[in-house]
Amino acid sequence: MLKTNLQEIVRDAERLELNDLIKIKKILDEAVAKQRNYDDVVITRQGAPYYT
């Protein structure tokens, strides 16, 4: 990631309010949970690797 992009992200993060940060955390937690569930399904799947 470019240094300028990181600086923009930091500036934007400084302007966020607590409610925004709480919403972002909830969304990220849900995304992580979905990815873990997907990984579990892929790992435990047996047979030929069909792509759905």
Image (spheres, rainbow, N blue to C red):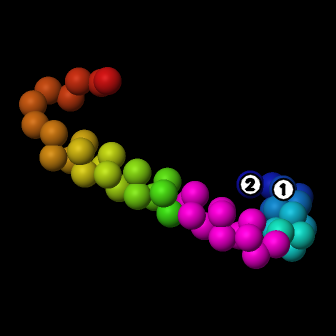
Q: Nearer the viewer, residue 6 or 11?
A: 11
Question: Which amino acid, by three-letter code, is at mark 2?
Answer: Met
- Residue 22 lies in the magenta stretch: yes
Residue occupying image coordinates x 84% and y 56%: 5
Residue occupying image coordinates x 86% and y 73%: 14
Identify the image quadrant of the N terminus: bottom right
Report which residue position mark 1 lands on: 5
> What percent of the width, then of the height, locates residue 46?
10, 37
What number of labels is visible? Answer: 2
Q: Nearer the viewer, residue 39 or 17?
A: 17
| Horizontal side of residue 44 vs 30, given as left or right | left
Residue range in magenta is: 17-28
Q: Nearer the viewer, residue 30 or 7?
A: 30
Residue occupying image coordinates x 21% and y 29%: 49
Task: Check disc 2: other Cα within 10 Å, few if <14, some if 14-19, many if 20+.
Answer: few
| Horizontal side of residue 30 vs 26, given as left or right | left
Residue occupying image coordinates x 50% and y 63%: 29
> What percent of the width, then of the height, locates residue 51?
30, 24
Report which residue position mark 2 lands on: 1
